[in-house]
Image (tube, rainbow, N blue to C red):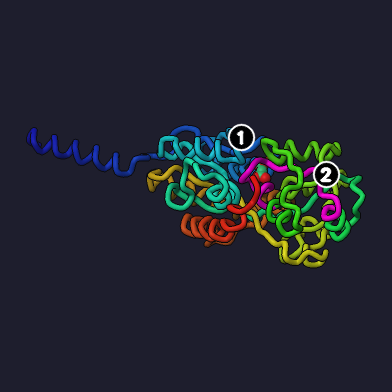
Amino acid sequence: MKKAALGLAAALTLALAGGAGAQGYPTKPITMIVPFAAGGPTDIIARMVSENMSKTLGQQIVIENVAGAGGTTGITRALTAAPDGYTIAMGHLGTFSAAPATYPNLKYDPIDGLQAIGLAGGTPILIVARKNLDATDLKGFVAAVKASPDKFNEAHAGVGSVSWTTCTLLKGQLGVPKLNSVAYRGTGPALNDLVSGQIDFMCDQIVSVAEQVKAGTIKAYAIASAERSPALPDVPTTKEAGLPEYQIEAWNGIVAPKGTPKEAVDKLVAALDKALNDENTKKRLMDLGTVIPTAAERTPEGFAALIKRDAEKLSPALKAAPK
Ligand code: MLT
């Protein structure tokens, strides 16, 4: 081959490698940022799903908990990382659909500024309380809160988190928007304080509270879904318990920085799909009440559409809510 032709071949090879951008991906461990404290719902789902994804990808997915500002600190870190497939994040209804309405200076755009990978799990919301709170059912709880809102403390994981968002909607519906609330770095630590009776109630995702409700260390007044959860069949729906207008579905899903190479995205999407089809992973998720996403929801397109739909749905109520 002549010198000029050799040069052209080398340039073409380089261009092709650059275009794919992730030849042989992954060749080293991947960091998955969890934007809340360890032990909460996001962390639990991230660890269960990533364990199986690591096997498929042949590289370890390492969980890094980066908590703060209702999860937006960790998601900002993930979405401003190099778009090379080696930094991804597990976020949720709060960080992607509620945060734009609650943080006017949010440093990421969940609609056009990220690469969706897929939905990892639906996480029904429960209204849970310390076990010795006087009210024995949802109607009693609602009546007591309405009568003396200043006597109650609600825990959440920061403005814009799922617990903050879902209890903000609840408090708005009950007409007690300013009821006292305490922010934590995640509902994992908040749950410890609920169990020890230092706070009164919270709205949390089923995955982190299911075991405690079963053990009787806290009580659940209702699940804010259309149907009861097979993981907690004795907990009534809000409709059954007398508050039918309080319905909200939370979820968790994986994202990567915008511009992540297609080869990496495709491999992450396939690994997530495989994890959610794996009997052992599925059982562990479902035992805690996670709703396994449909095939369409596991795709980048399906997940991006869900983020957008819920952002539009939540925006008016959250923009008006006290922060
Ligand atoms: C967590 O993992 O701590 C939660 O997802 C927090 C929340 O958004 O309520």
- Amino acid tagged 1: Ala
| Labels in figure, total | 2
Secondary element under disc 1, as helix, strand or loop, is loop
Mark 2 is surrounded, within 10 Å at the Cα level, by few (under 14), some (14 to 19) or many (20 or more) other residues, namely many
Contact flag, marks 2 and 1 (Cβ < 8 Å): no
- Amino acid tagged 2: Asp
In the foreground, 27 or 151? 151
In the foreground, 160 or 95? 160
Mark 2, residue position: 200
Left or right relative to 103: residue 243: right
Secondary element under disc 2, as helix, strand or loop, is loop
- Vertical position of residue 280 compared to residue 185: above or below: below
Residue 321 at x, y = what percent?
64, 51
User: Is residue 136 at all visible to an observer of this figure?
Assistant: yes
**Distance in Å between CA atoms under marks 2 and 1:** 23 Å
Residue 314 at x, y = what percent?
59, 57
Mark 1 is surrounded, within 10 Å at the Cα level, by few (under 14), some (14 to 19) or many (20 or more) other residues, namely many
User: Is residue 281 at all visible to an observer of this figure?
Assistant: no
Q: Please identify, in this view, whether the residue under mark 2 or under mark 1 is nearer the observer.
A: 2
Mark toward the start of the polypeptide (2 vs 1): 1
Residue 39 at x, y = what percent?
70, 38
Q: Which mark is residue 94?
A: none
Q: Is mark 1 within 8 Å of ligand 1?
A: yes
Mark 1, residue position: 67
Give the extent of the magenta segment.
145-166
